[in-house]
Image (cartoon, rainbow, N blue to C red):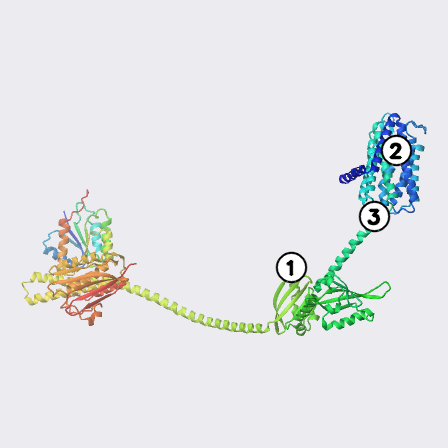
Amino acid sequence: MDKAMTRLFNGLKSVSKSGALKTGRNLEILSGIAALVGLCLISHYNYLLFHVLVELFSIVIGVTLFIVAWNLRRTITNHYILFIGIAYLFVATLDTFHTLSYKGMGVFAIDSADTATQLWIAARFLQGASLLAAPYFLKRKLNSGATFFLFTVFAALILGSIYLWNIFPACYIEGRGLTPFKVAGEYIISSILLMALIFLYKNRSHFDAAVSRWIGVSIVATMVSELAFTFYVGVYDISNLIGHFFKIIAFYLIYKAVIKMAFIKPYDLLFRDLNLQRAALQEEKKRAQSYLDVAGIIVVLNIDQTIALINKSGCHLLGCEEREVIGKNWFDTFIPERIRNDAKAVFSNLITGALEGIDVYENPILSVSGEERLIRWHNSRLRDEHGRITGTLSAGEDITEWKKAEAEKTKLATFPQLNPNPIAEVDLSGKVHFLNPAAERLFPDLRRLGVAHPWLKDWEEWVGGFLRDRDQEGRREIEIGEEWYNQTMYYVDEIERIRIYGLDITKRKRAEATLLKIHEDLEQRVRERTLQLDTVQRALQKSYNELERRVEERTAELEAANKELESFSYSVSHDLQAPLRAIDGYARMILRDHTDQFDEDTKQKFGTIRRSSQMMGQLINDLLAFSRLGRQEIMPSKLDMGGLLNDAWKELQMIHPERKMILDAQEMPQAFGDRTLIKQVLLNLLSNAIKFTKYRECAKIEAGGCADGKQLVYYIIDNGVGFDMTYHDKMFGVFQRLHSSDEFEGTGVGLAIVQRIIHRHGGRVWAEGRPDRGASFYFSLKRKE
Amino acid sequence: MNVIDILIIEDNRHDEVMILDALREHNIQDKIHVLRDGKEALDYFFGPQGCLGKVGICYPRVVLLDLNLPKVGGIEVLKRLKSDERTRDIPVIIFTSSDEAKDRNESSLLGANSYIVKPLNANCFSRSVADIASYWLMMNRTPYREA
């Protein structure tokens, strides 16, 4: 709004500027100022006279405006002027009464300023309202008679309410000044004027620029004068004076505006309208042209087949410029040769009117580059003002791509048709909408039966699944009669239908069934076999249990036998040895006590008795020791084999003090075993060596050992009588002897004990020898990890 | 004073003869008393007429105990002797034909003072008996306790 005001004031400035350049304008302003100065002087002399002169000026202008407008009312197109003219006549009327009722005029019998003020308010209201309403009639016809009548009624009511009925609210009270009604009234009027100004600004295009400026300034001046009148206390004070000055300006400017509109530029408004219309038409034409350019091909042909007009799309399609083709023969230039004559015939029929009603026609055109495009034409004939046919207008659209797509579509459409597998489209309720020939052939009842057909088995469940899970795809295998089908279902959301693609999987199913059958047979056989195996296993278990039981029995028997053996051994040791001891003891006593009574022979025989009994005792002891070995627990520990050998050797030396013996003890690796038992082994082997070297002057015995892989091997070598290797495997048996006991004493148990001990340690014992060349005894022990 | 030097507990007559012969052969003149079985042995010590009940009777200085005895075994006798405070100090020599580990271990546990297997060779037998007697009667000293 401020912007609008600023523009108006700027306009006013430019008016005064440009006016100052012209002598006429200069004169006008100078005389105006002179008049105002004169009036000012008069107001100092006699304010009443000043007031009368001012009002008279505005009354004259009001009446003049009316006279001008009213007389022009028949010819004028601008009813704005007419309305303003009528309105200002009644403004002038009210102003006349205002002037006559002015305090001090004495025309009416009134001595209050109130009446004049009331009339002032009424006149200004009428003026403001008229200025506001006037633009309404810029483009509308005004009923001048009715308007005149309405204004008359309004003015009469105002005057009546003031002079006759005294019902118009008081505007000025002597001594107190303006009433709130008056002040509020001025503000309301100012507001109306402001609105009028806005309204004017909005319609400014209907006015000459200067005219609209003058009217605008007039309105502003009226507003200023109104506001000035809200301040005054007395009707003669300064703000009253200023108010009246602005009133003069306001009226003068509206007069100028109306006169200019009515006489100087009476047709401006009309031309303005025409110009506006022309501009609109031009705009419309441009728009139409652009439509024309984008809306397919438009070709106008003259009657002689030459091109009269072609639009941009057409040029674009043909690949040429408009100016190149205008005047050329359409058919010779752009129609493929093979159909040229046909097309010409159609054209000539169209021109002659022989061919009525063919308004759609498809034919290919040939572009400059040689490419053919298929165009669908809408043809119409052009006629001149006499109705003669002057040519044709053809609008075409390029349907090449569409045709191709159509062809493609048609081709694609044959896919389901030719598909040997059944395809169906079914809506959610189970109604069949499409069946390809294969489906029709395979399921002739499908359309009729709908969901009752096995093809749509469990239909509701499937539909529910599609809707619930928002799945687009589902699969299942279904049996129809003898045949099996794999169904792939696609839920097509847009049409709420399900497409079912079937695939005959009967062969596969049969193969599966066969496989299944084979599998079941196999299973059955496996079951049977398993059963057989179970039976066998049960039998085995039974015999195993039987065996187990028997083993237990045997073990128990064995344990009992062992116990028996133990007690037997015990008995043997006591009960068999005791008599032998007695025999030897008594024989000895007899020999000792009666030695002088016996001859040598008897003595020898007693000696034999003693030796035999001792021999037997030794035999019994050895046997007991051997049998103990079987049950004795082995208590393994680290063994210093060299130390053990030494101990054994010392013991034996003590037993055989008479012998000359040398032990060559080599290094013997540490072993792991039962100390007592291994020492027994060494004792037995050494005593063996001693025994079989007794005929040597000096017994030479070598002992040693070494590690051999996972085992330790020890040896004891003597230089004794040796043995025949033929019998080497007999040496380690119980009671086995290679020499006579006469030759070499002994029970034949010693080496058997060695073997048993070594075996119980997981080792091995063996011997090498040759008669009279000494013997080598070896034994091995497991190496401790 | 009825002093017994060597108490022999031996059921085998021949062994007894050989033991006595050996002692005689080696001129061992000590007082010798022979008991035939285990019961006799227990009675000798612990019975109503046993030496423990009689005032002024001294205990044998050494006991030669066979293990394989009728009625009460030698092991039982050993146990009784060694578990009684009054007889505990008497040297008990096990003199048996058994070389069983079981017998040797048990005797040792019960406190036998020595374990000797009767030698088979008569010479050795004689020698052993003589050695035992000379060792335990002449060389060995038993603990001295106040009565």
Q: Earlier in the sequence, mark 3 or mark 1?
A: 3
Chain label for disc 1: A
> Can you say whether B118 is above or below A375 in the image?
above
Residue type, numbered disc 1: Arg
- Mark carried by residue A272: 3
Q: Are marks 3 and 1 in contact (CB under 8 Å)?
A: no
* Residue at the far front in the pictured view: A23
Residue identified by numbered label 2: A120
Q: Amino acid at mark 2?
A: Trp
Instruction: Identify the secondary structure beneath mark 1.
Output: helix
Q: Nearer the viewer, residue A347 or A774?
A: A347
Whole-percent x and y of residue A269? 85, 46
Q: Quadrant location of residue A638? A: bottom left
In the depicted view, which residue is nearer to us: A613 or B49? A613
Front tag of 1 and 2? 2
Is residue A457 shown left or right of residue A246?
left
